[in-house]
Amino acid sequence: MVTYWNVVLVLGAVVILALFALLSLLVHFVKQMDLRVAAVRDTLAAVTEHTANTALIPRAAESVDAVLAEGLRHHAFLGHVTSGGEP
């Protein structure tokens, strides 16, 4: 009878230790998930702030095209002048 109770107490202690270990892992993983979700939330907020000015993109593209066209005109002019042609 004493051996039976010793076995039950040892099994109970093993089960309690296993539950403690599993619950500790669960708490650890939940904390990690919470930190990662917060990081994703912050990233999405930053993306929202960065894309708030997308209306300026077409205007910037037009300006870049104008600068490129002006540069090409200068290139053509300089190529013509250096090859001996008249301005």
Image (tube, rainbow, N blue to C red):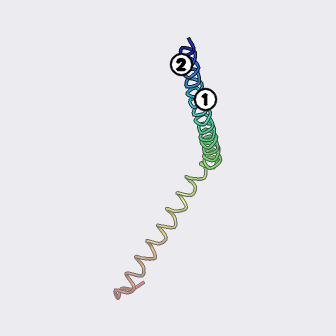
Q: Between residues 4 and 73, which one lies in front from this camera angle? A: 4
- Kindly identify the amino acid type of the residue bearing the numbered disc 1: Phe
Q: Which residue occupies the foreground of this view, 39 or 87?
A: 39
Please, is residue 38 above or below residue 69 in the view? above
Mark 1: few/some/many CA within 10 Å (<14, 14-19, 20+): few
Q: Pointer 1: what residue?
A: 20
Quarter of the image with the N terminus is top right
Under circle 2, the secondary element is helix
Residue type at mark 2: give it: Val
Give the tally of numbered discs: 2
Q: Quadrant of the C terminus?
A: bottom left
Residue drawn at x 42%, y 79% as measured from the top left: 77
Q: Residue furthest bottom?
A: 84
Residue drawn at point x = 45 percent, y = 73 percent: 73
Residue 56 x/y as whole percent: 60, 52
Residue 70 place in picture, x, y as percent? 49, 70
Q: SS for tag 1?
A: helix
Mark 2 crowd level (few <14, some 14–19, many ≥20, 10 Å Cα): few
- Image point (60%, 29%), residue name: 20
* First in sequence: mark 2 vs mark 1: 2
In the visual, does 12 lie left or right of 76? Answer: right
Residues tagged 2 and 1 counted as in contact (Cβ below 8 A)? no
Between residues 47 and 58, which one lies in front from this camera angle?
47
Q: Separation of disc 2 and disc 1 at Cα?
A: 20 Å
Horizontal arrangement in the rendering, residue 81 relative to residue 36 (left or right): left
Residue 42: % across, % down: 64, 44
Of all residues, the one furthest to the top in this rendering is 1
Dot in front, 2 or 1? 2
For the point 62% across and 33% down, the residue is: 27
Q: Is residue 69 above or below residue 39?
A: below
Q: Name the residue beneath numbered marker 2.
A: 7
Q: Position of residue 86 (x, y in %)?
A: 39, 86
